[in-house]
């Protein structure tokens, strides 16, 4: 469990990035952190594995303040996948990249081998085992970064913009995979601008603006609230936009995804014929 | 009139065992707004590197087949010659920006062309204005937000007034409102200045409405090429995993369930209008 209490953070440049955040993230939860560029989303999640320490207030991971634990120790439980994979990747082969942290954590060779195989397979990277990460495309490098974190099986997984550069099938796999992690009681925290991805997953959403939490609730509530969404520089999902447009015909306005929309429309259209 | 034409273009990176693009034959016309899409690793970025000569002149490797850009045979012309015609905006603006101020970054390409100072000043101001970042001209690029950096990258390419702009996921780090603003800038360059746009993009929901031509690649080959409407309704596009806009997906779902809205919508406005009609008439 992650407990954030009155968290303030000011960068050395004087930029006040977080201004009093209160939040609880439960085990097994799927949380999406959304909001405009510069809202403080990444700054917030960097506190969860101790990469940043609060200027004021505190962050407790399983009851322990992040001030009292090293990043190396926190990392065992909280894995962080950066927005830009190039900030993370450095090994000569994909396989070495994925094995790196496992070696650092002191796993046995046999375990490392098994975990590397598992992660490669999971993220469709087996064919690139011996390839340099830097020979891969942007989207593939992003998957290598993810694989290298998942390999050591942390309890909390933080993904900063995981859908960037991913095609639709990869996004769908990611969605399935997150659900699977949740089922194993793992916590997944996603920082994202991808409203369509969030609409398909319907997680709990916190909406940030200017260093504060503007609103929180399930995606279906948040993404269909026009006022909130505009304040956070987000655009409602396409399906919501369509239903808002048709609100005068008595259609509901809190629809976010295709299957639900299809059902509602079929019912309406069949009623009439 | 074709500004880019390739015939059986095949390219293999140095040391690679198989080609990254294979037998690519495409025609892009002057003033087109093209979306180039396909699964990650399908060869989109590699193809873009051919348009401005990075392939073969910088990356080496083996280039076979033919490619002519703005009337120039890419194999026979140097990157700096091609750069006058083709501007490339990278996926990650950090890979492109390096100067100490935004305006120096934007002026860099022009300095290399040995352009007179007055003319250069005008061009830089114009490019900054078009990209909507005039107020950032003195700021160091590395202190800017991802979205601002993406605009600087666009301005630096725009300053060269290229005939063709190739943008590799130029909004990937932006919030949706920021992304929409960038797409509007790009659209203006296309519609007002007639610059040919080639946009590499997965998020078709945001970009589809501006494009007149969609090219889909898979495993190094061009597998589909046509108007957005043709591509979004093709079974092949779905199978490859092209991110068909939800506005179009809803149309398809209704059709599968026996409700045909007759025309294929590409934008939310179009879908809403079709639904309004259907709900009224029935």
Image (cartoon, rainbow, N blue to C red):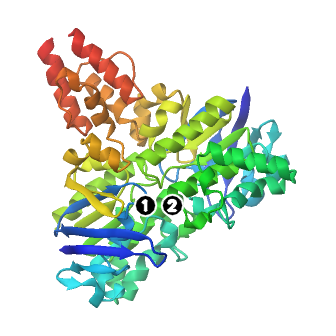
Q: Quadrant of residue B251?
A: top left
Could you say which is closer to the camera, residue A35 or residue B202? Answer: A35
Q: Quadrant of residue A213?
A: bottom left
For the residue pair B128 and A67, the one nearer the viewer reads as B128
* Cα–Cα span, label 2 and label 1: 7 Å
Q: Nearer the viewer, residue A143 or A10?
A: A10
- Label 2: element kind: loop
- Structural crowding at the residue carrying mark 2, measured as other residues with C-alpha within 10 Å and reported as few (<14), some (14–19) or many (≥20): some
Q: Is residue B239 above or below residue B107?
A: above
* Quarter of the image with the N terminus of chain B in it: top right
Give the residue drawn at x 31%, y 74%.
A8
Q: Residue furthest left?
A: A271
Q: Which residue is mark 1?
A: A38
| Depth check, front residue: A17 or B87 | A17
Q: How many marks?
A: 2
Q: Is residue A119 left or right of residue B122?
A: left
Q: Position of residue B168 (x, y in %)?
A: 57, 49
A86 sits to left or right of B73: left
On the same chain, marks 2 and 1? The answer is: no
Kindly identify which numbered label has been placed on residue A166: none
Quarter of the picture holding the C terminus of chain B: top left
Q: Residue at x 27, y 74 (%)?
A: A7
Counting from the top left corner in percent of width and height, residue B250 is at 30, 30
Q: Residue at label 2?
A: B145
Q: Position of residue B205 (x, y in %)?
A: 41, 38
Task: Say above or below: B38 vs A36.
Answer: above
- Chain under numbered label 2: B
Which chain does the residue under circle 1 lie in?
Answer: A
Q: Evaluate whether residue A118 shows in this view.
A: no
- The reply to whether callout 2 and callout 1 are in contact (CB within 8 Å) is yes
């Amino acid at each position: 469990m992650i407990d954030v209490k009155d968290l303030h953070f000011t960068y050395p440049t004087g930029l006040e990035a977080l201004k009093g955040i209160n939040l609880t993230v439960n085990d097994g939860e799927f949380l999406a952190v959304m909001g405009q560029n510069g809202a403080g989303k990444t700054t917030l999640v960097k506190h969860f594995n101790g990469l940043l320490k609060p200027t004021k207030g505190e962050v407790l991971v399983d009851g322990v303040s992040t001030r009292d634990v090293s990043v190396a120790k926190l990392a065992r439980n909280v894995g962080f996948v950066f927005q830009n994979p190039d900030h993370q990747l450095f090994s000569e082969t994909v396989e070495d990249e994925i094995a790196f942290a496992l070696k650092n954590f002191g796993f046995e060779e046999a375990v490392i081998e098994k975990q590397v195989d598992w992660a490669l397979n999971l993220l469709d990277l087996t064919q690139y085992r011996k390839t340099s990460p830097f020979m891969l495309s942007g989207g593939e490098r992003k998957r290598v970064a993810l694989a290298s974190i998942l390999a050591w099986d942390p309890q909390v997984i933080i993904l900063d913009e995981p859908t960037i550069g991913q095609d639709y099938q990869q996004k769908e796999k990611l969605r399935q995979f997150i659900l699977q992690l949740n089922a194993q009681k793992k916590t997944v925290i996603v920082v994202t601008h991808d409203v369509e991805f969030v609409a398909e997953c319907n997680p709990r959403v916190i909406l940030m603006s200017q260093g504060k939490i503007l609103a929180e609730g399930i995606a279906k509530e948040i993404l269909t609230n026009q006022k909130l969404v505009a304040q956070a520089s987000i655009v409602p999902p396409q399906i919501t936009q369509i239903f808002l447009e048709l609100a005068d015909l008595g259609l509901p306005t809190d629809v976010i995804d295709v299957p639900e929309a299809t059902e509602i429309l079929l019912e309406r259209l069949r009623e009439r014929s | 009139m074709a500004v880019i034409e390739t015939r059986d273009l095949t390219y293999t990176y140095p040391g690679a065992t198989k080609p990254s693009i294979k037998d690519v034959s495409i025609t892009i016309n002057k003033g087109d707004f093209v979306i180039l899409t396909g699964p990650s690793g399908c060869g989109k970025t590699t193809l873009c590197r051919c348009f401005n000569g990075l392939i073969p002149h910088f990356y080496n490797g083996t280039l076979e087949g033919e490619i002519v850009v703005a009337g120039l045979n890419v194999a026979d012309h140097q990157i700096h010659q091609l750069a006058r015609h083709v501007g490339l905006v990278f996926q990650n603006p950090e890979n492109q920006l390096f100067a100490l101020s935004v305006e120096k970054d934007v002026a860099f390409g022009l300095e290399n062309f040995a352009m007179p100072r007055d003319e250069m000043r005008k061009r830089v101001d114009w490019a900054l204005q078009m990209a909507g970042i005039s107020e950032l001209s003195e700021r160091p690029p590395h202190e800017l937000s991802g979205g601002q950096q993406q605009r600087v990258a666009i301005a630096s390419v725009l300053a060269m007034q290229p005939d063709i702009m190739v943008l590799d996921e130029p909004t990937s780090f932006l919030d949706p409102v920021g992304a929409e603003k960038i797409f509007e800038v790009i659209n203006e360059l296309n519609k007002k200045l007639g610059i040919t746009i080639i946009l590499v993009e997965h998020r078709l929901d945001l970009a589809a409405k501006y494009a007149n031509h969609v090219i889909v690649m898979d495993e190094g080959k061009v597998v589909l090429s046509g108007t957005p409407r043709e591509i979004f309704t093709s079974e092949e596009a779905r199978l490859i995993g092209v991110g068909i806009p939800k506005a179009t997906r809803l149309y398809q779902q209704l059709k599968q369930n026996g409700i045909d809205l007759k025309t294929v919508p590409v934008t939310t406005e179009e879908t809403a209008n079709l639904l309004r009609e259907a709900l009224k008439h029935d």
